[in-house]
Image (spheres, rainbow, N blue to C red):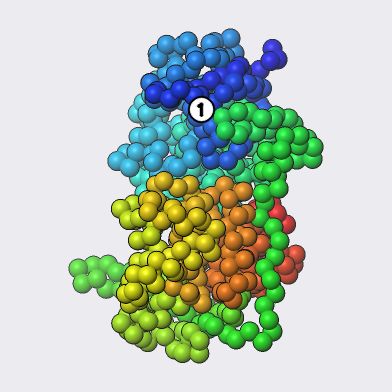
Amino acid sequence: MSQDALLTVDNLHIRFAGQSESVVKGVSFEIKPAETLALVGESGSGKSVTALSLLKLLPESTEYPQGEVHYHEQALMHATEPQLRQLRGNRISYIFQEPMTSLNPLHTLEKQIGETLRLHRGLSGNKARIRALELLNLVGIPQAERRLSSYPHELSGGQRQRVMIAMALANEPELLIADEPTTALDVTIQQQILELLQELQQKLGMAILLITHDLNIVRRYAHRVCVMHQGVLVEQAETAKIFTQAEHPYTQSLLDAEPGGHPQPVSETAPVLLNAEQMKVWFPLTRGLFKRVYDHVKAVNHISLELRQGETLGIVGESGSGKSTLAMAILRLIRSEGAISFESTRIDAKTQVELRPLRQSMQIVFQDPYGSLSPRMTIEEIVAEGLEVQGVTDRGERARRVIDALNDVQLDPSIRDRYPHEFSGGQRQRIAIARALVLRPKLIVLDEPTSALDRSVQKQIVELLRDLQSRYKLSYLFISHDLAVVRALSHRIMVMQGGELIEEGETERLFHKPQNPYTQALIEASGIA
C-alpha cells in the first residue's frame, strides 16, 4: 500500500454472527485523494458489505476476524464509536442506493440537511439554512429555496438522489462512498448525477468509492477498478486495462455479459396482431369544493402503434413519459380513448366480462417479480392461477401445463412446491414469465422485466425471451429505459416523452441515425451508441 493513500483496506475478512464462513475474504485495496475507485461485481459479491464495514455500519454482531482499515493513520477497526461518529457524514460520507428509504419521510429537506450541519459543524438557524440552500443549488435542485420546505415524497427519484448527494457533501468530505447511486434512475438522470459527482470531485479534491454493477458507468467515470466475486477481490487494475486486458475469467465473463445480438426478422407476411389509433389517457386535475376540472395530465396523448405477430416493439423514455400507462391502456387495465384492435377485433369498447376470454391471449410480466409473486403461494399455485381463472378445471391438465411452462423458461419442474423467497431475482423473473406463458398468449407486455437484475442475468433473460418468441411466434411490447436491452430484443422502437410519441423506427436505424434531439440525448447518455 502506498504512503499517499487516503484509505487502505488490508486483508479484510467479514463474518456475520452465527456463520462459520466469512462473507468477505481477504479483501485489500487503497483509495488515493481525488481518485474514483469502482468496486464492481454481481449481487451477493460482497461490494456493499465491504463498503459498509469501512466505518463499521454493519450490525453490531458482525465479526471482523482478520484485517484492518486505515483512514490516513487511524485504524478504524479498533476505533471507538465516538471516533467513528466524528468521521461518518463528516470526513467520509455515504450515498445509499435507495434515497426514499434513506431520507426521513416526516422531515423537510431543510431539517434533514441541517441535522448533519448541526452535528459536525455546529451550524443552526439561519446559518444552517443558508448552507442548506447553497448545497441544494450546488447539486442542481430547481427552485432550491422553495424546496427547502419540501418532503421527500414531493420530489422525483433524480431529485431525491441529488438531495442525498447534498447531505453527503454538506461537510465537504475527503471520501464519498456511492453505493449504486444511479441504479433506479433514467439514463439521462444517471448521466447528470455522475457528471455532477465528477464536477464536485474536481472542485473539492474528493475521492470517490463507486459501487456499481453497470460497466458502462465504470468505463466512463472510474480511474481504477476492483472486481469482486463471492466475497473475494479477484482482480484490480487501471480502468483501461480492465476493459482491454482483463486477466481473471470472472472479469472476462462480466465484460461479455452485455446483452447483444438481434431478434430474428419478422416475416413480411406476418399478420398485424395489435393496432391502436389516436390513443389518449388524460387524468383530470380538480379543485374546489365541487371538484371542478381545471386541467389534465396528458399521460398518453394521441399515440398510434401497430404490432405484428412475432415482432417486438420497444417503448423507451424517461420515468413519467407514459410508457407503462400506454401498455396498461392497451391491455384495457385503465380507461382510454381511441380505437384498439386485437386480431382485427375492436376491444376498446368491451366490458371487463367480455374481455376475460381474451386475457389468456394478452399477458404481462412486471418489473419486480418479488412484488408480483405472492409469497404465500407455491410456484405451482402461482403459475397455475391463470389456468383456474380461464376455466381449466382438470388437475392433470393444469399440472402438465405448469411443467411445460417451467421447462420453457429453463427451470426444473421439481421446484414447483417451493416459494418465491427461495429463489434468486433472475429465477423469480423466469417464474413470472412462466406464469404468463402457461396461458399460451399471443401478446406479452414486458414492463421493465430486467431492470433489477445483474447484467449477466439480464443477458440470460433476453436470450430466453428471444428463444420463446422464435418458438411460439410471440409478440412483445417491451418497456424499458435500458437501451442496451431494448436494442438486443426489439425490431422497432418508439420513443416517448411527456405522453407524446417523439420518434419511432427500425431499431438499428434509430440507434445510428436518431432524428430527434431527445432521442439523441437518450442514446448519448446510455453510453452504447
- Identify the residue at horizontal 46%, vertical 25% (top origin): 89
Question: x, y percentage for residue 231?
Answer: 56, 29
Q: Residues within 10 Å of mark 1 (few under 14, many from 20)?
A: some
- Can residue 250 be seen here? yes
Quarter of the image where the C terminus is located: bottom right
329 over 422 or under it: above or below:
below
135 over 58 or under it: above or below:
below
- The answer to which image quadrant residue 285 occupies is bottom left
Question: x, y percentage for residue 294?
Answer: 33, 72
- Identify the residue at horizontal 44%, vertical 69% (top origin): 401
Q: Is residue 322 left or right of residue 462?
A: left
- Identify the residue at horizontal 63%, vertical 71% (top origin): 470
- Identify the residue at horizontal 54%, vertical 70% (top origin): 477
In the image shown, does 526 or 437 lie closer to the viewer? 437
- Can residue 208 be seen here? no
- The answer to which image quadrant residue 508 occupies is bottom right
356 over 152 or under it: above or below:
below
- Judging by the rendered image, the residue that carries numbered circle 1 is 23
In the image shown, does 318 or 288 lie closer to the viewer? 318
Q: Residue furthest left?
A: 289
In the image shown, does 357 or 335 lie closer to the viewer? 357
236 over 252 or under it: above or below:
above
The amino acid beneath tag 1 is Val
In the image shown, does 448 or 414 lie closer to the viewer? 414
Quarter of the image where the N terminus is located: top right
Q: Residue furthest front?
A: 396
Q: Is residue 280 left or right of residue 314?
A: left
- The answer to which image quadrant residue 438 occupies is bottom left
Question: x, y percentage for residue 349?
Answer: 37, 87
Question: x, y percentage for residue 480?
Answer: 55, 61
Mark 1 falls on what kind of element? loop
